[in-house]
Image: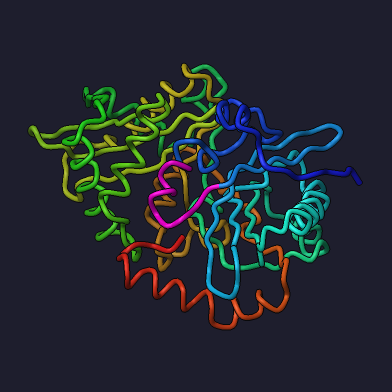
Amino acid sequence: MPEFTARFATAAEIAQWDTLVTANPNGGNLLQSEAFAAVKKNYGWDTQFLVFEGADATSYNLVLEKSFPVLGKLWYLIKGPDVAKVEHIPPMMAALRTFVKRARLNVFAAKIEPDVVSSEAARAVLSGAGLVKVPNLQPNDSTALLDISPDSNELLRKLHSRGRNAVRRAIREEVEVVRMDPTESTMRTMYELMVGTIAAKASTQARDFEYYRQFWTEFAKRGQGRFYFVFEDGEASVGGFVINYGSKATYKDGGSLQKRNQYGDSHLVQWVAINDMKELGAVEYDFCGTPPSHKLKDPTHAHHGLGLFKTSFSKTVTDFVGCYDLVLSPMRYKLWTAAGERGFRQLYTRRTGRQFY
């Protein structure tokens, strides 16, 4: 088994953070980015920049940190650690445990959620390392992924027939996709479409507009995020925000009017974005969230409709292992799971009106 050490990143490394993260063994993740770190600083989290070093691999990972009375600090390695294979996680966690203890960082637990495909073998490696499975936090712990490396004609042929036919019909009927500048007006229009779609098709609730405005602004100003719209009778009818981060692209946010006439408009938004992302060097397109694969056809699932749309491009759903806790102080972690997490989440939401995680 390989050995790893853990440390904080240097100032020079933080200055080139996105370059280092996108060179990670698994290509990094937009939620480990400099832009996302800037957003979370204004939403109740401190940020740390953590490095795992091994003989054959170095992994750069964003850590979100919250401090609590009595308990100490909770670390959240959002979408990390980034690894080439699941067998690297146990020695990384051993390195993390050693680092926290030696540096006296007062961390009682660390949440991890590596982008490792779920399997019985992978889950056994994680549980064998003493990691505790907890509820997933991110919408794309189950998601539709599309290999966009083929040329456009071949890629279109490889799409699921539902998606391919919708794209072709929208093109025939001259539906126009407009790339919009990241202005206040664009963002408010995007948010209204999102809120309307969530109200109609999901049981979840959107974060406040200010969160999305900062999120979209941070990625757009770094050249990592683009808005796409379709208009019908002068009104925005479909909107999408797509992020390019290294070799990966993500359909992060979207929404549409529930009554509209242009068939295939939402599919064409995706098709235009996919081809733009290819030009920017992406080889994988993440549709960012579906029901788990075993519930994809369950009409009662909150994301059933979204899952059908997204799998009209990619024919399968990828399930990742999801979220696990590394327990660093058993006594304080017991307090956290017994009442602390629930209590602090409720208190934070009542005080701020915002989501805890």
Q: Position of residue 215 (x, y in %)?
A: 36, 42
Q: Position of residue 270 (x, y in %)?
A: 37, 33
Observer-nearest of 287 and 1: 1
Q: Position of residue 113 (x, y in %)?
A: 62, 54
Residue 166 lies left or right of residue 21; in this view the side is left
Residue 24 lies left or right of residue 347; in this view the side is right
> Which residue sits furthest right?
1
Rendered residue at 83%/63% (across/down): 128
Q: In the image, which residues are magenta? A: 37-47
> Which residue sits furthest bottom?
338
Rendered residue at 26%/30% (across/down): 182
Rendered residue at 74%/64% (across/down): 131
Q: Is residue 167 above or below residue 257?
A: above
Q: Is residue 24 above or below residue 42?
A: above
Observer-nearest of 199 and 337: 337
Which colour style is shown? rainbow
Q: Please identify the quarter of the rendering in which residue 10 is found.
A: top right
Observer-nearest of 320 and 17: 17
The number of discs equals 0
Is 170 within the magenta?
A: no
Q: Position of residue 332 (x, y in %)?
A: 66, 76
Q: Is residue 328 above or below residue 36?
A: below
Residue 100 lies left or right of residue 199; in this view the side is right
Rendered residue at 56%/53% (across/down): 141
